[in-house]
Amino acid sequence: MRDNSILIAMSGGVDSAVAAHLAAQGREAAGVTMRLASEGIGSAEAAQSDITGAAAVCDLLGIPHYVAELGEAFRQTVVKYFIEAYEGGLTPNPCVFCNRVIKFGALLDFATDKGYSKIATGHYARLESSPSGRRLLRRAADIGKDQTYVLWSLTQEALTRAEFPLGELSKAEAREIADSLSFPMAHKKDSQDICFVPDGDYAAFIARITGRTPEPGDYISREGAVLGRHKGQLHYTIGQRKGLGIALGKPAFVTAKSAINNTVTLGENADLFTTRLIAKNPNLIPFDKLDSPMRLLAKVRYRQEASPARVEQTGDNTLIVEFEAPQRAICPGQSLVLYEDDYVVGGGIIC
């Protein structure tokens, strides 16, 4: 690989365009856009539009532009994981998995094949090196745009080869840079949905891809009494209140699900609060393992303030978290992310 060379992942949006501008200065650089659309997944027209926009920015910057054909890899990893998790009664976060296996997995391999030593993305996050030489992941300067929640699973190898040029910027500053450079996407709106389910209808997407229609099942109470019928457990998530299609004479919330029994448990809002969780498959960033319990800040969903908690690792594969204050609607399948001040300690998948 060529020293100080960098390949910038460009989605066709404003953030990755500005990241390309910043990362490319004074070094050998190129842009790359991943084509993730495949039959039934994503829009070929939208994908081509993103490629065209990214290529136009690369032309303005005077750097090459590549297209990485990763549609099949995306289907066999991220989409497969997403479907299996929902059918298994979980609420997955595919962006976390995609960052690990696609952006900093398959795309990192693509960069290596092309001879580039590093890869940059438009994530709002910061990187530093510890005295021991480990790479540390730090929250973005603009906390409102911080994206470290979806980066916790990156390995030391990936973090060593990663750059996040937007880490010190606000979104407004990024747009100002894009506007000053006449980038075509300077005022393009941010995407808010999962890229391959733009309408947010996960159940319909899964039915279309798999050809399997969710089986109706029973709504039950905490005591196991049948309350009514639901349209398939994967239509629901912990904490959901709207769209249940059942009247119990008082507000009802989804408090649990069982894929094995195809049941959805309904209860009161108070039933959603807990102080304890278990997470599996941990990835720790400043060190390999928690040798003793730590007081850290923990969050269980992307748009949430991190809360004080005691964290203990048992064995190689389990984190036990005890929160100081009860947390609402913890969803199995989502990510637990741990922080010490601004730094990401690591995370795991909630059981």
Image (cartoon, helix red, strand yellow):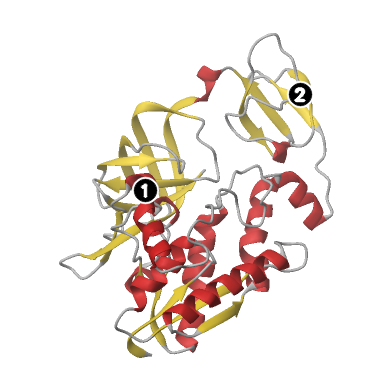
Q: Is residue 71 left or right of residue 296?
A: right
Going by the picture, which residue comes out furthest to the top? 249
Answer with mark 2 or mark 1, whichever residue precedes in sequence. Answer: 2
Residue lying at the far left in this picture: please name it. 131
**Residue matched to label 1:** 314
- Neighbour tally class for label 2: few under 14, some 14-19, many 20 plus, Cα within 10 Å: few
Determine the secondary structure under disc 1. Answer: strand
Q: Relative to 194, does residue 121 appear above or below in the rendering?
A: below
Residue, disc 2: 245
Q: Position of residue 14 (x, y in %)?
A: 47, 61
Q: Amino acid at mark 2?
A: Gly
What is the C-alpha distance between the residues marked 2 and 1? Answer: 41 Å
Residue 286 image offset from top left, x and y in percent: 26, 59
Residue at point 65%, 34% (across, down): 257
Location of residue 268 by image quarter: top right
State left or right for residue 302 relative to residue 12: left
